[in-house]
Amino acid sequence: MPELPEVETMRRGILPIVGSTISDVNFVRSRFRKILITPRSDQFRRKAIGQKVVDIGRLGKRILIHLANENAIVIEPRMTGLVLLSSPPDEEHLRVGFQLEHGPVEMLWFWDRRGLGTVRLMSKQDQQARLGSGQLGPDALTITAEQLREKLGKSRRVIKVALLDQKAIAGVGNLYASELLHVAKVHPETRCDRISKKQWSAIQSAMVDVLQEAIQHEGSTLSDGTYRNALNIEGGYQNCHRVYGRDGMKCPRCRTPTIQRIVQAQRSTFFCPKCQKKR
DNA sequence: CCCCAGTCCTGCGGGC
DNA sequence: TGCCCGCAGGACTGGG
């Protein structure tokens, strides 16, 4: 479930490798389906080995490891992927190992239990094609209320489902969509084209507040315990959730036990019907 | 354009 | 106790 706060925590965790040189790349054979790695191993290795890591960025739910040759290793953890500097939770789900030199650590791992994650080495052109505005919307931390309204304001989709559309806005996933709508006091089934200018501003500022707050707590580790930071330590934001996973429990704002779970686009949504009125 | 259902994948918890 | 099934939801795809 890594969303923007978890991926940002991973990014910060691996910042110490900036300045290191990649001395080897190994794709670990596992008994499971190979995760999606492009290009194939020999080409990947040729373009990555010997390259210095010059910066580590993030766009939405993707980590970008920028190399001196202007290529970038783009990691998408998806559901269960982890980027680690310390020893991984287990050996059997290790997917990629990057050996490093001239820096403080010797290895960067990509570990992924379910194997839905991807690791792609992209040229400058690939990055523009795959991460440009045609494919990925502005990052959730920097999009303005005006941009948000431009992107979604005419859509007939309901707001909670629309917030998950990475082409419109990058970084929000299922968990934080519920959380931010609760803070913004907007009902998750509100159609985008019925949302007022004032509400778009409330959504945008709630989004930034919730995501920043979650980053400060190093993300959310749910009961399956999968998500960890780069040092294999759990996040703390799960203890701060207002509505996610709390159906039947007390709303932290209005204090009445009204939190409800509904299903939208085959995904769980949690909200307080008292605080988040439908218009 | 939009929406929905199916797909990938593993681990888990509930029900019998 | 053991087995099966449904669920979790990142992104993507094909059909309507």
Image: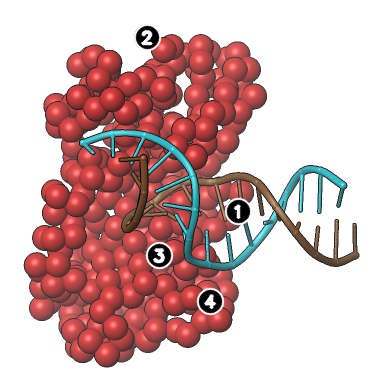
Chain colours: A red, B cyan, C brown
**Distance in Å between CA atoms under marks 4 and 1:** 20 Å
- Mark 3–mark 4 CB contact (< 8 Å): no
Mark 4 crowdedness (10 Å alpha carbons): few <14, some 14-19, many ≥20: few
Which residue type does callout 1 highlight?
Asp
**Distance in Å between CA atoms under marks 2 and 1:** 36 Å
Which residue type does callout 3 highlight?
Gly
Q: Viewed as shown, does residue A123 lie left or right of A79?
A: left
x, y percentage for residue A277? 43, 12
Q: Viewed as shown, does residue A122 lie left or right of A1?
A: left
Q: Earlier in the sequence, mark 3 or mark 2?
A: 3
Q: Which residue is mark 1?
A: A224
Residue A174 visible in the shown view = yes
Tell which residue pokes out farthest to the top in this image: A279
Whether callout 3 and callout 2 share a subunit is answered yes
Chain hosting mark 3: A
Residue nearest the observer in this picture, A174 or A194: A194
Q: Viewed as shown, does residue A164 lie left or right of A151?
A: right
Residue nearest the observer in this picture, A165 or A216: A165
Q: Quadrant of the C terminus of chain A?
A: top left
Q: Which residue is mark 2?
A: A279
Image quarter of residue B4: top left
Chain hosting mark 2: A
**Distance in Å between CA atoms under marks 2 and 4:** 48 Å
Q: Earlier in the sequence, mark 3 or mark 1?
A: 3
x, y percentage for residue C2? 85, 67
Secondary structure under the numbered disc 2 in the rendered image? loop
